[in-house]
Amino acid sequence: MRRDGETGGIKFNLKELGGALGDFGPLHPLFLAYVRITGVNAAAIMLVMGLSNVVIGLYYKLPLPIEPMKAIAIYAISNKWDVRLISATTFGTAITWILLSLTGVLKKILWIVPEAVARGIQLALGIYYILEAWELMHQSIYLALFALMIIIATFLQRRVDLPATLILYTIGITMVVMEYKVNDASILIYTPTIQTFTIEDVLRGMWEVGFAQIFLTLSNAVIATKIAVNERFKRKISDENLALNMGLMNLIAAPLGCIPLCHGVGGFIAQYVYGARTGGSMIIEGVIELTSAILFSNIVVQIFSKFPLSIVGAMLIPVSIELGESVTKLRNPAEIATAIIVAITSYLTNLGIGFTTGIIVYYAYTKILKQSKTLSNSIVIIKMKGGI
């Protein structure tokens, strides 16, 4: 499945389309929850994501997908935040990531983060995804198994570049259209509106969840994503690239009433697994989102609110395997142990706590190891002197 040394570029073909569609699996549950519970305009989300995907695809010529910031999403949805507070928090995250990337503070923070911690975060996300996939597949186990058979068949075949995601989305949308009535299939031209907020809104949003999100984003959207991309592509990205991307896209998103957005290793792996190898997948996804935002946002929400979740669950299986596999890159037993501790802690608590725990464990072990070596050397010296 993995092909190291991909060169990137921009191509438009069925594989890139398959990769673009692969990103919708991890994205759409949070997207729908935001729209249905908090009242965020679906068109605003798709507009900003579409523009960002096209620009990033053209500039980097790599698959670097965009997704909602998960901690903020879960907190905002569970507390039923209004659009004003969501937009204010989007603005707060934008300023945070722009400052971190441009001041050089991010480089200083990342200097202390070992690779084992990033691998542990990827493993944790793999666990999250496999459990989520298992739960979703039980919505209709037979449909899920059928979807898995299609995925396996497309991975095994070599002659026809027909992506699994294209087949599965065609099946899922056909099922929705046949089983449910789409209440409003009219074309509505979306006109963006400006969302206002106050500095108090920004401070509240950042205090309640925004600052906690920084650790999750740092581990998942920056460190883990950079490693995952750079080990698969000759065209490299930096931590500062990813941080600045997130800052700028959220700076645009905030006044348009959009949710906080970030990169993510899960979205990248989803695109890569299903065929994305160039920035073409980003551009294809962006065009789909822009078209949906401007003309079909009401239809998109209706279809995806009824889309078979068992198919989404099946699509997450290979993504979770690819994420979990990253820990095999580690060779040092201490690093492997650190990654496992990070994954377990992240699963039992959250990614931020797992990230912090991993750093503490890694450096505590390193310090103990150094002290042990120093003590051993001292004992050897004493024995040598005693024998003289």
Image (cartoon, rainbow, N blue to C red):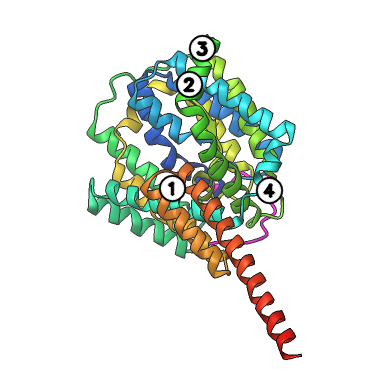
Of callouts 1 and 4, which one flags the residue occurring earlier in the amino acid sequence?
4
Q: Is residue 260 above or below residue 375?
A: above
Q: Is residue 26 left or right of residue 332?
A: left
Residue 270 is situated, as x and y percent measured from the top left of the image, at 49, 48
Magenta stretch holds residue 257: no
Q: Is residue 230 left or right of residue 23?
A: right
Contact, mark 1 vs mark 4 (Cβ under 8 Å):
no
Residue for point 45% across, 30% down: 72
Q: Quadrant of the C terminus?
A: bottom right
**Crowding near pointer 2: few (<14 within 10 Å), some, many (20+)?**
many
Of helix, strand and loop, which one carries label 4? Answer: loop
Of helix, strand and loop, which one carries label 2? Answer: helix
The residue wearing badge 1 is: 165
Q: Is residue 14 above or below residue 198?
A: below
Q: Where residue 311 is drawn, which disc sits there?
A: none
Range of the magenta residues? 1-14
Q: Where residue 111 is drawn, which disc sits there?
A: 4
Q: Nearer the viewer, residue 112 or 61?
A: 112
Which residue type carries mark 1? Thr
Residue for point 56% across, 41% down: 221
Residue 275 is situated, as x and y percent measured from the top left of the image, at 54, 52
Q: Nearer the viewer, mark 1 or mark 4?
A: 4
Of helix, strand and loop, which one carries label 1? Answer: helix
Q: Where residue 205 is drawn, which disc sits there?
A: 2
The residue wearing badge 3 is: 200
**Crowding near pointer 1: few (<14 within 10 Å), some, many (20+)?**
many
Query: Disc 2 to disc 1, how far (Cα)?
Result: 36 Å
Query: Disc 4 to disc 2, how far (Cα)?
Result: 28 Å
Magenta stretch holds residue 3: yes
Which residue type carries mark 2? Gly
